[in-house]
Image (cartoon, grey):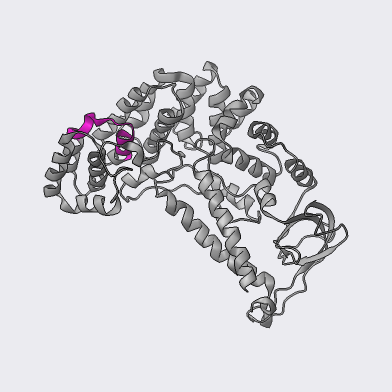
Amino acid sequence: MARQMTILSSMLLACLLTSSSRAARGCPFCSVTTATFNEEITSMDAVVYARLVKLPPSVKAADRTDPTKEVPKATFEITEVIKGSEHLEIGQQVQTIYFGNGKIGSVFLVMGVDPPKLMWSTPLQLSEAAQVYIKQVVKLPRDPTKRLDFFQGFLENDDEMLAADAYDEFASAPYTAVKNLRDNMDHAQLTSWIRNPDVPASRRRLYLTMLGVCGTDADIPMLETMMKSKDRRLRAGLDALVACYLTLKGEAGMPLVESLFIKNKKSEYADTYAAIMALRFHGTESDIVSRERILKSMRHMLDRPELADLVIPDLARWEDWTQVERLVKLFKDADEKTSWVRVPVINYLRQCPLPLAKQRIKELEKVDPAAVKRANTFFPFGPADGSPGKTEAVSPKTSYNGQEDEDLFVAARPAPRRATGNAGRVATRASRSATSAANQNDTNLQIPVNSSLALLVPWLVAGGLFLMQWLILIGPSHRD
């Protein structure tokens, strides 16, 4: 049992490290749905194509609830070794748990860890196209732009598994690699996918990000029409849509964005939040729209007290200390519907270097001592060096998926969440189709959450599930 727990701990640690690195990477607005084939293969000791030789024997009804009975295993014959030839040979038979109804002779991808007595993952049945694809993937160069050039040929592939894997490769790639791909992008194909209302919102975000790289002024009318549309399917991925529009239109596009989503008090929360995410992108990753122009736009949100907390962290991060008195008034005027604005206001004042800020904190403490106490309790360290006026306490970069430390400023509040797929899966891709189907309804944005919790919770759940899988896999005879 100790051996299995050691393996499990190592794999979970590797997954956590991978997730942590992803939080700081990825093309803007893209959310990774699962580990890619390349990532999974890299983490394994052995990877093979194997032919199904024998299905597992049927289980008697009485044995299904008997914990002392091992789960029957299917038998596979290795037809090709992708990785780990020093441990395996063609023609060798392996046994592993398999719950499907595959036909005898079908080819599967099977991966194993911890040689010499390898522990095998659940097999994944492959089409002929997938078999060729995986063998090409493992031979790709390390250069991220060259890799993306290969994967863009599989976006929206007829084989959903390949299309999803290609998307995840883009989602986990550095944004600079996406920009460097500009000359090799298929502009006509991208606009076709963007116009297609049946394309999942997650992938639409990627295609809009790519269009922002290779698009022209001729694309602006299409983007404006989509932004104004009442059809939520056409507006899916609105954060990337607004960002793409501003990339191509420049500061001249700001009035439309403001009138539709920032100043418009009838704009839905999800739409306004999407526009703010787009502005954050341009404030950190681009110089197309000036920082001062973005701040001017965000200040309009202070006229909407119920949503003002969404931009207060940005004002502090970008050292806009011109709004002290306005925020003090928001604090004093807050009611039951807008009370969550008070903690962000206090945190803004704690970072402000002006002497006036300290005076206002003491003043506001008399109005709502509980809010000031919450700010000091949940954010005890304040700025990075413990003194006011330093904005390094909040990272200047965001992942644009609501998962960065900026969100520590935002008090808990009810809001729509975005489906994020199966975050806990490590070594199996059986639910790719289900993940894709869930993304079809991806029209709302994920609310801001603490980045550490966002990473930790899914992997804790994954750890429990993975432990259960290993215990089933090794059988009762190996648990001691």
- The magenta-colored residue range is 310-326
| Residue farthest to the front, as pictured | 385
Which of 64/150 is in front?
150
Is 322 displayed left or right of 111 in the figure? left
What residue lies at 21% left-to-right and 51% top-to-bottom?
A: 371
Query: Which quarter of the figure has residue 86?
Result: bottom right
Is 56 displayed left or right of 233 in the figure? right
Which of 106/137 is in front?
137
State the count of labels.
0
Residue 172 in view here: yes
Q: Is residue 35 above or below residue 112?
A: above
Image coordinates of residue 278 in percent, x first then y, are: 43, 32
- Asked if residue 312 is among those painted magenta in the image, a careful observer would answer yes
Position of the N terminus by quadrant: bottom right
Q: Is residue 177 above or below residue 407?
A: above
Image coordinates of residue 108 in percent, x first then y, are: 77, 55
Q: Is residue 51 above or below residue 5?
A: above
Give the main secondary structure, helix, strand or loop, of the magenta stretch: helix
What residue lies at 50% left-to-right and 35% top-to-bottom?
A: 28
Image coordinates of residue 33 in percent, x first then y, are: 57, 47
Which of 48/380 is in front?
380
Residue 311 in view here: no
- Asked if residue 212 is among those painted magenta in the image, a careful observer would answer no
Is 372 displayed left or right of 73 in the figure? left
